[in-house]
Structures are given as structure tokens and as C-alpha cells.
Image (spheres, rainbow, N blue to C red):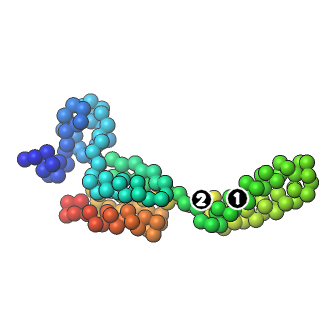
Amino acid sequence: MTKTDHAADFKMIPCPSCAWEISIDADACPSCGAPNSWVHPTLRTIIDHIGTLDRVTKYECRGRRMHLVSTSQNTRQIIGSFMMVAAMVLLVLGIFIPFLLGLAILCICVGGLLTLFGLSVFTRHELTIDLRLSDPIVGTHDQRFWADIVRIVKLHQGPNG
């Protein structure tokens, strides 16, 4: 029986530091405390895919579990953020030029409304994957945002997970 067969059948691998048998989902070796660096091949494919994206995506991965977080801004949020920054500059300059105080208040109102209706300055997108479950997509805040990642999971999902 090869090491690969052993890991697939019993979900155990040797610790990279001390060779003690540990679960592929363990955070660390119970014998020596070394962190478990084994990652499921499907999750490795996702990690490679994340590197090709034009958005910053942070992830944490252990064994057959992965949590991803990314943020984005729509046009309303970008303009609202810019208006709020401009308002702060105008408030400071308004100390010396009173006309700019009125302009600052206008920027605060418009920028505040734009970010209010955008619900925030940015949108946070999260996705949790657990390949140990029959439906590995545990949680997501935006199916369309994560469609490419979900497609990879469904493509690589085998009979044993």
C-alpha cells in the first residue's frame, strides 16, 4: 500500500517533522506539535486559481477545510468614499476660507448618502468550504462573486470528497 493509498483510505498521513501518524485534518501533530501543512488537492487548485484573479483574496486552509475572504467596491461606494475624503480636506481648509465649510457639508451629505445606500465603503465576500461534507460549500455571502471557486469544487468533487 502506498502512502497516497494510505492517506486516501484512512485519512492519516505521517507528520512532516516526526513521522507520527496524524489526521489529514489535524491542525498540528499531537506528538511534536509541528503544524500540519497537508492540503487537499482540490483546495490546492483553488489556491492556484486565486493567484490568477484580479482581486485580493485572503484564505486560510487546513486539510480539507478552507475559508476565503475578499472585498470589493461598487461605483457608488467609490464615489461616496471619495466625497467623504474630499469633505475632510474641505473641513480643514474651511477654517481659513468659510465658503469651503458649506462645500464640505454638501460633500458630507452626498458622500454619506452614497455610502449609506451602498451599505458601507466596501462589500465583504466570504466563502467557507469543507470537503468532509456531502455539500462542501458551507457558507457564502454572494454566490455570483464566488461562482468560479464553486465551479472548481464541484468539478473536483469525487465520490469520497
**Tag of residue 122:** 2
Q: Which residue is mark 1?
A: 82
Nearer to us in this view, 79 or 20: 79
**Residue 94's spot in the image, x, y percent?**
87, 51
Q: Amino acid at mark 1?
A: Phe
| In the displayed structure image, the side of residue 125 where residue 52 appears, left or right | left
SS at badge 2: loop
Q: Is residue 41 visible in the rendered structure shown here?
A: yes
Measure the C-alpha gap from mark 2 to mark 1: 12 Å
Quadrant in the rendering for residue 106? bottom right
**Could you tell me which quadrant the C terminus lies in?**
bottom left
Amino acid at the residue labelled 2: Phe
Q: Position of residue 54 (x, y in %)?
A: 48, 59
Asked if residue 112 shows in the view, the reply is no
User: Residue 143 is drawn in which quadrant?
Assistant: bottom left
- Where is residue 34 shown, x and y percent of the image? 30, 33
